Amino acid sequence: MPQTPAVKTPARIPATLIPGDGIGPEIVDAALAALDALGAPFEWDRQIAGLEGVKSAGDPLPAATLASIRRTRLALKGPLETPSAGGYRSSNVRLREEFQLYANLRPALTIVPGGRFDNIDLVVVRENLEGLYIGHEHYIKIDDDPHAVAMATGVNTRQGSRRLLEFAFTHAVATGRKKVTIVHKANIMKALTGIFLETGLELYERKFKGKFVLETVIIDACAMKLVLNPWQFDVLVTTNLFGDILSDLVAGLVGGLGMTPGGNIGADAAIFEAVHGSAPDIAGKGIANPTALLLAAAMMLDHCRLQDKAARLRAAISAALNVDNVKTGDLGGKSTTAEFTRALVARINNS
Ligand code: NAD
């Protein structure tokens, strides 16, 4: 992946650690065990956010957490809970805004073969700061119904679209990708997603023509094509809400949400996390699959130019899953998070 922020590899690398909510602390423990076994030089500053922030500090994004990331410019984060339809605003969205993490890089790669779809190797690049996702919403009261009408405003800018598209195109070239597909809905939301499409086509003509094949597809058709023949795609670049939905869809192609990591990347900070949420239905049971967060940790190692350790981590994950056959329930196995972590650490120690 492109090393957007200029991160050096000093002896110790200060980094913020947010265990998060639900299964967060369980999968973060697995990631820490793996990173320790690799001898990764992160100097962790442990902070809280989300529901844990509300419970312990009365704030879903405490000032100390923001100050920590302002200092380290680097974080590994467990999932953060956001209440639906009311309650506090998403701490994830606020973190992305605060540190201008405009690019959300979400690779989906088949690690465990033999699933419904094999040999998947896709990347979703999601715009992370604009669109309908910004949450500029309100209700209009009519008579005695305070929620009679709901309204939302989406905002996409030329500049915001261009920097994200430039990130995606540069990433495609740097990683030898053959095709980039711009996903949009410019037939209906002609202005809101038309600006993204138009900016992408213009940028390709001006700067990237011939370096890869550029295609465009409407979001609804894209969803169908991904299910019928996902191999026709390579890099998918899209606006915030569509990227949110498509990244869960492509997670489903590689074994589910337990398998897909994400990097939130800006000009001078980056936060790595799993694509999935806090999974309250399985929290505390010790059965969560930590692979997505482990793959996020591998992205973080790459980002810090520790590619050797990242490669060892990815190889150990694959060996623990495929050779040792230690799999959590979501992958059809019976192992616990702790059993998988033990197999993984043994693999790392032998690598
Ligand atoms: P979810 O991703 O937490 O869970 C969806 C389903 O996938 C659940 O059945 C869950 O058990 C399963 N799942 C998810 N991760 C798994 C793993 N590692 N191993 C095994 N199974 C796993 O989505 P949700 O239930 O819609 O959301 C729960 C909370 O998470 C909400 O408050 C939401 O706002 C939040 N959320 C946070 C983030 C983030 O922090 N980046 C992302 C998405 C959702």
Image (spheres, rainbow, N blue to C red):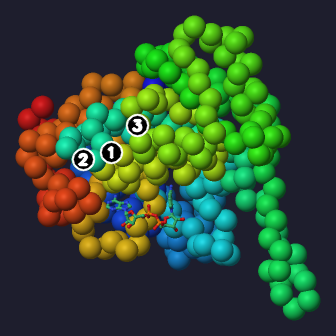
Distance CA(mark 3)–CA(mark 1): 13 Å
Tell me the residue at 59%/73% (across/down). Answer: 83
> Badge 3 is on which residue?
229
In x, y percent, where is residue 222? Answer: 54, 41
**Which mark's residue is nearer the viewer, 3 or 2?**
3
Q: Nearer the viewer, residue 12 or 308?
A: 308
2 and 171: which is toward the camera? 171
Query: Going 33% across and 45% down the picture, which residue do you hit?
Result: 254
Give the crowd class for mark 1: few <14, some 14-19, many >=20 residues within 10 Å: many
Q: Quadrant of the C terminus?
A: top left
Res. 115 mark: 2
Is residue 183 depicted above or below 23 in this figure? above
**Residue assigned mark 1:** 254
- Of tags 1 and 2, the one toward the viewer is 2
Which residue in the rendered view is the most extreme toward the top? 210
Secondary structure at numbered mark 1: loop
Q: Mark 3: which amino acid?
A: Asn
Q: Is residue 66 visible?
A: no
Describe the element under mark 3 as helix, strand or loop: loop
Q: Quadrant of ligand 1?
A: bottom left
Identity, as a three-letter code, of the amino acid under mark 1: Val
Query: Are circles 1 and 2 on residues that touch, CB within 8 Å?
Result: yes
Residue 18 against residue 253 in the figure, above or below: below
Closer to the chain start, of discs 3 and 2, is 2
Q: Is residue 102 left or right of residue 117?
A: right
